Each structure stands twice: as C-alpha cells, then as structure tokens.
Image: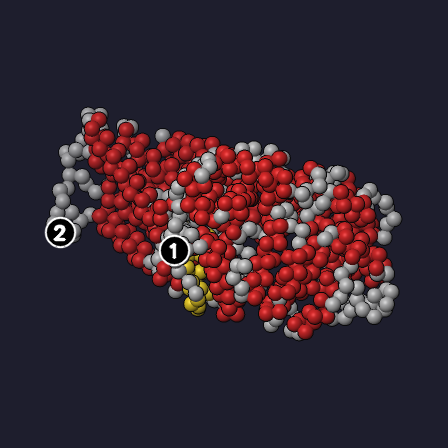
Amino acid sequence: MPITAGAAAALFTFLTPAGRNLEYEHVTMAAALIAVFWPLARIWSPGTTNWLVTALALFTGLLIPGSLMFAFRYCPCSPSGYGQWLLIQAAPSCLLAGCATAWVDRLRIHPSGTHRLATRSFAARARLTAIWIGVVLASIAYLSATLWFYPQKRAVSAFFGFLHGPIYDERIWIHADVMRARLAHALLFCAVGVSASLNPQLKPRPKLLAPAGFTMAGATAALLAVTWAAMTWSLHDSPATGHGQRVLQNQFAHVTEGDGFRLFHHDANGARSLAAEATFHIRDLREILGGIEFPRVDIYAYPDARTKKIWFGGGATDVTDVWAPGIHVTASSDATHHPTLRHELVHALTSRVAFHGLGFHPNMALTEGLAVALAPDENIFSVMSMDEAAAELMESGRIQRPENLFRASTFWLESGPRAYTVAGSLIHWLIRTRGVSPVLALYSGKDWQQATGADSAQLIAAWRQDISTRDSTRRNATATRVRASTLFRSGGVAVDVCPHSFADRLAANPDIDSLEYMATHTGDPAYDVIARRREARLIFESHDQAAARELARRVIAVAPWPPRHEEDIELRILALDLIAFSGDKMETNPGLGGLAAFHATHPLPVHLARQILVRERLERILPVADALPWRWYLAGWAAIPGQGSDLPDRKTGKHAPWLIDYLRVRNWLRSGVPADISSQVPGFMNKTIDLALTAAEPDFAFEWYRGLAELLERGSGASQAQALWLKAAAAASNATVRDRMEQNARRAAFATVP
C-alpha cells in the first residue's frame, strides 16, 4: 500500500506540464502530496505498519515512475539532479508521512494494548482528520507569513521542503545549510516516529527520566529531538536559511543612504553609480506619479546571481518585496544604468496605493503593466517598440483575446514576454490618452468604469485600434514574423522541457554531442546554433579548410530559406564565414549581398542586421587581407584586430574608417573602457558616420551615439553625455527606445520630467 501511494503521488504530478519534467518541481509536488495525504489515508484505512518501513516504502514508490522513465530514455532530465532533489525534498517528507501514521496508529490503540480501529467511530476519525488538516493549514499559514513579511522569498518548510522563490529561475543553486536544515527535519520526524513506539500502556509520569518511563526508545527520541533543536538553532542566522531584515542586511558590507532609499551593497564603486541612478529614477517617478504616498525603499544589490539565489530566493530575475518595500537586484556590470531598477522602483513606489493597501494588484496585468509602461525593457523592445510588438502579437494570433490577460487567474497562462508586452502597451496607452490618475485609481482597486469612465471592453477595443493604425514601422508580415520569432515564441517556463537540467548542462560548457542532444529534446534551434559555432571554432583553430567547406555545406543544407526564425539567419552567416575561411569559391544563395537585400525588404533585428551589413561593408572599404581578421573577430573566433593601432583607410591612408571605430567602441563597452576615453570621444563625435550603412540600417547611428554616451558615463565624462543621449534619441527609429534615450539624457543632466 505505501509503495502504491508513493507511485501514485509521482504519477499524479505528470498531470501538470512542469511535473512531467523529473526535476525540482516534480519531486517537490510529489513529496508534498505524500506528506499531506498519506496520514489522511491511514486515518481512514485499517492496519498498522512500522513507521520506518512505511517511510521507505513511500520513498521507493515515489522513485519507481522516475526510474522507469530514465530507464526507457523518456525524460532528458539529469538523473543526478533528480536524485539530489529526491534526497533533499522527498526523503524527509516520506519520514514525515511515516511518523505521522505511526502516531495515527498509536491513537488507535487502547491502553490495554488492543487495536480498536474496526470499532472506532466516524466522529473519532473525523476529529483526527480535522486535527491533521489543521496542522497542514497552520504550516501553510506560517510559511505564507514568512514569505510575505520577511524580505527573503525562500524557505525550508517541514511539509514542503526547500522553496526557492521565483519558479522561473532555470538554475537552482543549493547551499549546504539547506541540506542541513532538511537533515534536521528528518531527525525531528524520526524522533516523533520513535516516540510513537513507546509502550502505550505507560501512563504519563511527572518526571521525564522516571525509572518506569525511561526506555531506550525514549532516550533515542529525546536525543534526536535535542539534535534537531541544536541544528535548527545553529541555522537561525544562516544567509541561506535565516529570515528577517537583520539576517539579510548583515550579509552586505556597506549601506548608502539616499533620497527615499537605502542601498545595501558590496562594491563601493558600482554603488555610487547605482545610488545616483536610484536617486534620479525616484525623483523622476515621483514627478510622473504625482502626489501619492511614497515609501522609503530598501535596495539590495547582490554581487552575482548565485549569491542572490541563496540569500534571497530568486537569482535570474529581479524582484520587489512590496511589504517592506525592498528591491532585490543583481549588481549590473554595466555602470551606466541597471536594466531593471526603474521597473522595480515602480512596484515599490506604488506599493502604498496598490489595491486597498495590499502592496500590489492581484490582477498581475495591472501590476506588471504599470511597471512596463513606465519602465519598458530596452532589451526586449530594442527589436520592436512596445506598441508594435503588442500589435504583432494580436495580429499573428499569439495573443487572441487580450482581455483574458486582465483577469487575476489567467495572466500567468501566457509566457512572460507576451503578457508583459500586451499589458504594458495597454497601460501606457491609458496613461498617454487619459493621464496617470485614472490608472492609479484602477491600480488602487477601483473597477474600470469607476477609474476611467469606460468599461474594459471599450478601452481594449480603442487601444487595439490605436496601436494598429499607429504601427508604421512594420513593413510586412514576414518581416515581423522573423523579428519576433525568438522574442515571443516561448511557451513559458511551465511548459519548458527540463529547464533546470539543461541550464546546468549549458553552464558546464557542454560538448557538441550534448548540445545536439539538447536541441533534439527541446526543439529550440538556439542549441543547434551553439553547436555549429562550437564546431566552426574548432575548425578555425585547427586551420582545417576542408572541414570548413564540409561544415558550410551541412549548415546550408539544414538552414531553410526563406527563414522562419532568427537562427536560420545566424546559420547562413556562419556558413558564409566558413566559406570565406576555406578559400572556396562556392556560390551560395543568398550570399552577404542577398542577406542584405532580404533585410531591406524584411527588416531583421538589429543584432542580425549588424552582422550582415558590417561584413559586407568591410569587404568594400578594406583590402581582403585587412578585412578577413575583422571577419574572424565578428565570428567570435579571434580577438579584435589592431587593438591600439588604427587600420588605414584605403582611400586616404591616414585614418581608420568610421566602421572600424564603431566596432572598437562596441568592443570597449564589452571588455573595458580605455583610461583616456573622455579625451577620445570628441574626436569620435567629429567623424562622419558611414551613410551607406545608416541607409541600410538607421540604428547604426543610434548605436554609435548610445555607445559613446555609455563610454563617457563609464569614464569620467558623465556630465558630457547628455548631448550624446539626445543624439541617440534622435537617431532611434523605435518609439520605446527613443523614450528611454530621452530618459537617459535627463538622468545624465539630473533633470526632472519636462
């Protein structure tokens, strides 16, 4: 019976998409089912079993479905990862279920030693059921209060194991203190199980060690309980298991006070930039949001994603705790601005007016829509503006009924990029057409009619019509499909195939066979691109021109044309690089010129257009011998050529072409800023931008000015960057990016909203 129950719990989790992956989510769900429902089953079923045997049987049953799936190669998850979570999550839960049933059996035994299950009344069983349900609900309430009131969004629960915060983190780093905490739970459960085996005929005695009541079982239970208490106390201040502001803030070396915030950090140099940025954004948002109550915000800048995962609970994403309120971010290597700080500040600054004081609106489309509207992600919307992306999502059918997003129970059924984009576009439209006050009234808990004077259906219809007619940058459906393919094709983490296992594999620098295995099982063409790039680099390093020709032919054979995804373009570019390296005269359709012509009629994302157009232009303005090293650099096979010395312009013989400086500026942004950059920037600004490139892709000019502005801010010329940010805004063809550049100009000049 326990084996069957364990297997049933494991099989039941397969009903959910995340539970079909044999990873953290699968084991956690199955272990929680065992811990909660097996004692209930024992209350209503006859028979008694040794508690330890019961725990082992439950664990064995839970293990059977997963073992069979691995044996038949049905699941591509990591067996070692599955085993890790079985030990951390499931083993203590099985002990909990076993010791709880031992006490159920103990309560069934009459003081005379006879079993009375068969004659036990329905009312008595109902009382036991109510008691157990009360224990479970109390545990859930305590866990919920811990996650709500304390800044840490992770916990180690006796019933539910290690809860790591946001479920969309692909990597789940585990700390030794978490394992010790679960070991302590196991010892506690064993103590309870052992205590259930004490002679039920012994009446309670006033003295714990009274000769008649002192048994080996009692001593064992007492020792286990004392050990649990000592281990639990020792973990009270652990950065991985402790809770409270004191515990968290003690982990940071420094604290910086600012206007409306406290910044906890480790890096004093980076903190100066982050504190200045926080000061600007808080003042900027106060001006936009008007006269509402603004709380003081605690900002925690973690040194890296792993530390943030262990101390806080979420590593890959930045999060706002609206109760404190507190913002938890990973310190950015980009010294000019933090990519998500403004978004999180919107959540924090509006927490006092949100939904009757809750801190956020339970309809997450309103909560996230407001933050995206006031702080759009420039990485997402560098490809398409927010309104353009929302219009494409609806016209392509990826979002068929946007009104479904504005219901509390349906927002998370869409992937994050799609849901955030549509919600942000609608809220931004409301702010633009009706002002911020109605939006804040809606956010505070009023219905659509009360807040805006119209119902949601009318507003959504008007918004759809507006963004559809205003969307003038999309030139045709095929262009939009390619541009948005990578950005919006994800089905969401809940339906990803083994996300944690694959993230760990990718972090471990997998070989080509492993990458191909990952591509086959996920259907994600990005893995195949990584594999082919890895293979191409090995060929380049071995100087094997014949292998380069063969790989180029294989890549062209599998890269469809016309392209369906960005990866199809990336593979074509890689094939052309391999052909150039092999010295072959093999003609391909399309070549670089054909790819450039495709971009002219089917506008590609800027990062792809850049790869195509830069390669083509270099071949036109430089001799072949000078152009090839730059091509290998663009392919990622070699270091940047001529670092520290200019390549001569073919016509003048005096100065490097503008394109070379453009590439060097981009390289400096990634690898480090020269010490004398402030003195070099004016010379760069006086250079004439290559009009042939900007005619083919206007964003070259935008990237040039943005890059120079970032270099100035990373160096010592932050006060001089405003003019460059404004030039970047003027050159941007994307409305969302243009707004962000103007915001950066205000920040550089420390101005408020005009």
- Front position among marks 2 and 1: 1
Decide if residue 671 is in sight here: no
Foreground residue among 331 and 450: 450
Q: Which structural element holds mark 1?
A: loop
Place residue 719 in its image quadrant: bottom right
Q: Residue at x 36, y 30 (%)?
A: 1
How far from the left and from the top, in percent, is residue 366? 46, 43
Side of 722 relative to 408 (left or right): right
Residue type at the position of mark 1? Glu
Q: Earlier in the sequence, mark 2 or mark 1?
A: 2
Foreground residue among 257 and 127: 257
Q: Which residue is mark 1?
A: 293
Q: Residue at x 51, y 66 (%)?
A: 276
Q: Is residue 195 above or below residue 719?
A: above
Crowdedness near tag 2: few (<14), some (14–19) or many (≥20) residues, C-alpha within 10 Å? few
How far from the left and from the top, in percent, is residue 613? 77, 52
Q: Are marks 2 and 1 in contact (CB under 8 Å)?
A: no
Q: Residue at x 19, y 41 (%)?
A: 199
Decide if residue 700 is in sight here: yes
Q: Which residue is mark 2?
A: 207
Quadrant of the frame with the C terminus: bottom right
Residue type at the position of mark 2? Lys
Q: Which structural element holds mark 2?
A: loop
Foreground residue among 143 and 215: 143
